Image: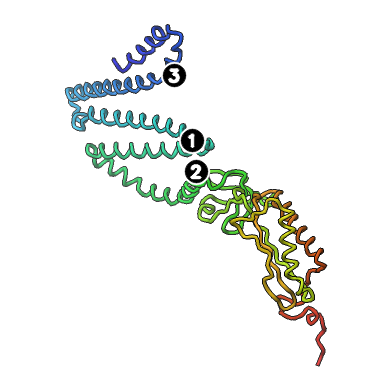
């Protein structure tokens, strides 16, 4: 009777005695003690069921029904009851741990629900394995036959759910890894680039620059290199400039002027610990090549990046104009390696 009386007794003491102290209103069904009392009460209930099973086994044996006594029915009830009781306690502790952990990480409710279901399945599987192992000692052949019949269906189910399981596991890993979040601009190893529009347990939606949405399974994303462009707080501007041979004497001057104009026009230019180069790099077949390479403390993604790139180009043009120079146009075809003038000359017949 203790299992059924303990909880009402606790409620009576709580609501009629302890709550007379008005400052202690938190004690009651929502208090910490109540779940503990309920757990103890359930344990006593299991003892009562075991005692009832023992009575049933003795009575059936007296009436000539020997099966319950042969299979030790009270022991089976005790083992099954206490195993399920322990599983329920572990499940409750697991739920409390997951809620606390995911509140701290500020994770989505969908991810929390998935973790909760996966751990529940794991607990049920362990509980079933313990019970099957115990029952096989008493029922032996029946349990073995049941497992044998279920073997083929288990294999079929495993093969059918393999891809789904891979996507779920990949989705969990991506959600908890912190590599990127919804709204980040990312670039995948296969060249796919865009904003993370939506993240689910099985797939990811990426919004590309033309506003189209591409859906990619999580296991494909998980297997690729991912660059989170939204977390890059610096960017590079690199330009290759071509000048005419007529301006070869002005090359030292123009490189100096370009550097000065960029430093004056771009306040977020990184001048220390990062390259800032404006150099005459090469003498080509039809041009003189200058490379401008500079870096800025500006996020890689956003309008500020494009505005800064425009400022760099404007600074380059001002410096070139001050030096009285002009850019060189290509005179040779990259494909045929011949002058453009030769490509448009009609061939003479015979």
Residue at 72%, 57% (x, y): give it: 262
Disc 1 from disc 3: Cα separation: 22 Å
As drawn, 241 above or below 61: below
Q: Are marks 1 and 3 in contact (CB under 8 Å)?
A: no
**Secondary element at tag 2:** helix
Q: Which residue is mark 2?
A: 176
Disc 2 from disc 1: Cα separation: 10 Å
Q: Are marks 3 and 2 in contact (CB under 8 Å)?
A: no
Disc 3 from disc 2: Cα separation: 32 Å
Quadrant containing the N terminus is top left
Q: Which residue is mark 3?
A: 30
Q: Earlier in the sequence, mark 1 or mark 3?
A: 3
Which sits in the foreground, 76 or 287?
287
Q: Which residue is mark 1?
A: 102
Quadrant containing the C terminus is bottom right
As drawn, 280 above or below 104: below
**Secondary element at tag 3:** loop
Q: Quadrant of residue 190?
A: bottom right
Residue 287 at x, y percent in the picture: 74, 74
Which sits in the foreground, 169 or 66?
169
Residue 143 at x, y percent in the picture: 28, 41
Residue at the extreme bottom = 350
271 on left or right of 15: right
Residue 46 at x, y percent in the picture: 29, 23
Which sits in the foreground, 233 or 253?
253
Residue at 19%, 23% (x, y): give it: 58
Q: Earlier in the sequence, mark 3 or mark 2?
A: 3
């Amino acid at each position: 009777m203790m299992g059924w009386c303990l909880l009402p007794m606790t409620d009576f003491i709580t609501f009629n005695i302890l709550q007379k102290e008005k400052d202690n209103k938190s004690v009651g069904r929502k208090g910490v003690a109540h779940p503990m009392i309920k757990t103890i009460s359930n344990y006593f209930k299991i003892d009562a069921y075991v005692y009832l099973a023992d009575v049933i086994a003795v009575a059936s044996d007296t009436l000539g029904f020997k099966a319950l006594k042969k299979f030790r029915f009270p022991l089976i009830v005790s083992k099954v009851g206490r195993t399920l009781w322990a599983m329920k306690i572990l499940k409750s502790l697991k739920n409390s741990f997951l809620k606390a952990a995911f509140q701290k990480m500020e994770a989505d409710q969908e991810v929390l629900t998935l973790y909760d279901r996966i751990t529940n399945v794991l607990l049920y599987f362990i509980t079933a394995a313990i019970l099957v192992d115990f029952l096989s000692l008493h029922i032996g052949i029946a349990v073995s036959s049941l497992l044998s019949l279920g073997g083929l269906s288990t294999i079929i189910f495993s093969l059918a759910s393999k891809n789904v399981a891979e996507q779920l596991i990949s989705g969990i890993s991506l959600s908890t890894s912190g590599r990127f979040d919804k709204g980040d601009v990312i670039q995948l190893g296969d060249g796919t680039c865009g904003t993370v529009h939506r993240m689910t347990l099985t797939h990811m939606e990426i919004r590309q620059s033309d506003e189209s949405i591409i859906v990619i399974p999580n296991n494909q994303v998980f297997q690729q290199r991912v660059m989170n462009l939204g977390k890059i707080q610096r960017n590079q501007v690199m330009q290759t400039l071509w000048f005419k041979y007529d301006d070869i004497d002005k090359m030292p001057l123009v490189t100096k002027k370009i550097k000065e104009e960029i430093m004056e026009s771009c306040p977020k230019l990184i001048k220390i610990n990062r390259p800032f180069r404006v150099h005459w790099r090469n003498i080509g077949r039809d041009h003189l090549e200058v490379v401008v390479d500079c870096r800025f403390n500006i996020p890689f993604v956003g309008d500020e990046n494009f505005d800064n790139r425009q400022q760099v180009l404007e600074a380059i043009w001002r410096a070139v104009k001050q030096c009285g120079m002009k850019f060189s146009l290509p005179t040779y075809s990259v494909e045929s390696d011949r002058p453009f003038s030769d490509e448009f000359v009609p061939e003479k017949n015979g």
